[in-house]
Amino acid sequence: MEKNSDTSNANNMSKTINAIEASNTSNTNNAKIAIIAIAAIIFLVSAVLTAYFLMRPQPIEGAKNIHVQITVGGETVRTLEINTDALFLKEALDEANLIDGTDSGFGFWVTSVNGRIADDANQEWWALYKNDEFSMTGVDSTPIEDGDWFEYRLTVGYDDADW
């Protein structure tokens, strides 16, 4: 009986060793897959950031004449021309003392235009349009060119944005 017991113990030990080796192989394969996935994500993020920095709108130096319209409730409440050497819209609007807001990690958030404060409680916010198209950049990163038309529209509702 001792030989059968020893053989049985040896078989069990062999099965255990085989299971551990299989588990180690599986863990090694999982680690390799994880490393490849992380490398791929890093590569994709780098590619997107590089493309953004190469393709983002570039400012133009020199004197410019821009037009700014302020719309509340579908009605134009003010239109003005601004002559400026500013590179970005925020600089020009600051020169005209037209906007107020707060800096955040996402850029400058405009809370007031021409003295009219957007009411968060009513889901009001100022939408920026450049040459009659919704601006995909914030006021502090929107470059200006001579002859540009900008509009700030007081918009109500976060779900029904006109973009």
Image: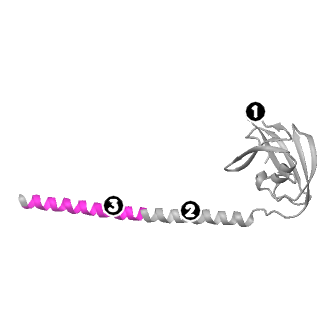
- Number of marks in picture: 3
- Looking at numbered disc 2 in the image, what kind of residue is underneath it? Ile
Q: Is residue 138 left or right of residue 47?
A: right
Helix, strand or loop status at disc 2? helix
- Looking at numbered disc 1 in the image, what kind of residue is underneath it? Asn
| CA separation in Å, label 2 and label 3 | 27 Å
Q: Is residue 136 visible?
A: no
Does the magenta-highlighted stretch encompass residue 126? no
Bounds of the magenta segment: 3-30
Quickly name the residue at label 3: 23
- When asked about the image quadrant of residue 162, the answer is top right
Q: Which mark is residue 122?
A: 1
| CA separation in Å, label 2 and label 1 | 40 Å
| CA separation in Å, label 3 and label 1 | 58 Å
Q: Is residue 98 left or right of residue 40?
A: right
Q: Earlier in the sequence, mark 2 or mark 1?
A: 2
Residue 92: % across, % down? 85, 53
Quickly name the residue at label 2: 41
